[in-house]
Structures are given as C-alpha cells and as structure tokens.
Image (cartoon, rainbow, N blue to C red):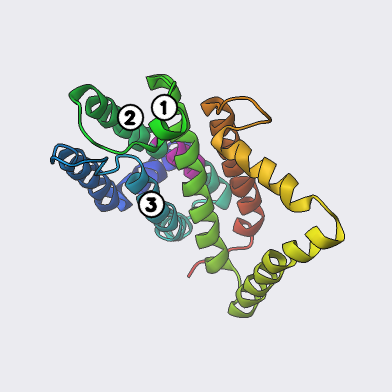
Amino acid sequence: MKSRLKTLILYHFFNLKYLLAMILFILLLNFGIGFIPADGTVGSIDLPVFVFIIFVGAEIFREAFNFALINGVSRKSYYISHIVSSLVITASIMLTTTLIALVSQQSGSNNLIAFDWLFPEGNLFEMFIWFFGVGLAILSVAWFVSLILFSLPKKVQYLLIIIMVVLSSGLTLLNFAFDGILDTLLRFGLMFVGIFGSNPANPYLSAMMFTSLAFIFVATGWLFLRRAELK
C-alpha cells in the first residue's frame, strides 16, 4: 500500500514536471520584468501562478488515474495519493512564490503582488497561508472539472452546462422574488477576500474559505471517481 502510494505521488510530480518548470520560469521572468523602469507596477508575481495552477489541476487527473488503474491500483489508493500530491505540489509552488515575492519586496522591484494589494498589513507567513489556500482551491476545482468531463457521458455534460447557465441567469429572478439574495451572496463572496462585516480584510479568513472550497470539491469528486472507468 505505502509503496504504491509513493509510486503514484512520484508519478504525479513526473507527469507535471514541464508545467512546474514553466511556472518557475514565469515567476522568474515576471520578477525580472519588475526591474524595468515604469510609472506603476509591472510583472505580477502571484496572479500568473494562479492561472497556471488551473492547468496543473486539469493535468493532474487523467494520466495519473489511468496509470493507477492500468497497474492494478485501487481508486481509493489513487484518491489518497491525489490528496497528498495536491497538498505537496501546492505547498511547493506557493513556497517558491512566497520566497520570490519576498525577494521582490526587499529588492524594491515594481512587481504587482495581489496579496499586498488585498492585505497591505499582512506578513510573510500570512502570505504563504493565503497563497496555499487560493492555490489549493484552484487546483481542486480544475481537478474536479477534469474528473467530471472524464467520467460523465457527453449528454450529461451538456445537461450540466445548461443547468449552470439557467441557475446563473435565474439568480436575478430569485432576487426579485426574494429580496436580498444577491446581497447575501455578495457578502458571502466577500469572505473569500477576507472581508466579514465591517472588519478589515483578514488573510486567514480568506485562506480558510478557499481551503474549505477545495475540501468540498475533492470530497464531492470521490462520488464521481468511484464510477470513473479507464479510458
């Protein structure tokens, strides 16, 4: 069991090696761009990483899942290996991002760092915790979407898309029928950037919200994973 988990975790890293190298390249490139003389901020440090984690989350499923089933590894073992790999990969990426952001801050670079904009009083540890929470949520959502597209028939996929469109457009109608729904959703959404009531933005609240979102998608993913077949 342990040897299979270790093999699967290593396979996750091996399968993602080019994407991880690309993320590091983008980080260093944007860090260097920050030294170009400019009137405002240039070369964002964290935002491109969040975008690339979408590709990491989408790529992390299919190859590793097929590899596991081909080699006789159970879905449960794959699921555990995915959770461990996601935590380690996200922590590694975000630790690197945090360190480069720190160097950017200390060197007087003009880099844009979303964390500094949202939480100007935040410290280095809070930055890492926030990066980790956001990154884990993005990776988990991308993994879940990839799992859905992999496991469900085309007709069901189209049906889900239609339902999502109807629900999103129906929010306005619900707000007319039940006054205050959009305001409630807005207040809930603000918690993802650490704002609750009249309190100042809190990175721990934001990180907790994103981590909870990741947990929900990973837990729900198990229901679909149990029925996913080798392709």
Element assignment for label 2 = helix
Marks 2/3: CA distance?
16 Å
Q: Amino acid at mark 2?
A: Thr
- Residue at the spot 55% in from the left edge and 28% down from the top edge: 201
Q: Nearer the viewer, residue 215 or 48?
A: 48
Q: Which residues are magenta?
A: 81-88
Secondary element at image label 1: helix
Q: Is residue 25 above or below residue 93?
A: below
**Residue 85 among magenta residues:** yes
Q: Nearer the viewer, residue 177 or 144?
A: 177
Amino acid beneath label 1:
Met
Determine the residue positioned at 79% across, 58% down: 175
Provide residue 63's location: percent of width, then percent of height: 40, 59
Q: Position of residue 222 (x, y in %)?
A: 63, 51
Task: Give the Cα separation between the discs numbered 1 and 2.
Answer: 7 Å
Q: Pointer 3: what residue? A: 51
Residue 168 marker: none
**Cα–Cα gap, marks 3 and 1:** 18 Å
Q: Could you tell me if the residues under marks 1 and 2 are in contact, i.e. CB atoms within 8 Å? A: yes
Q: Farthest residue in the right direction?
A: 177
x, y percent for residue 214: 57, 43
Asked whether, in this view, residue 167 is left or right of residue 28, the answer is right
Q: Earlier in the sequence, mark 1 or mark 2?
A: 2
Provide the secondary structure element on which disc 3 rests: helix
Residue placed furthest toward the front: 39
Residue 107 screen position, x and y as percent = 18, 25
Q: Which residue is mark 2?
A: 98
Q: Is residue 76 magenta?
A: no
Please name the residue that numbered disc 1 is placed on.
Answer: 127
Picture quadrant where residue 89 is located: top left
Circles 2 and 3, Cβ within 8 Å, touching? The answer is no
158 is higher (above) or lower (below) than 20: below
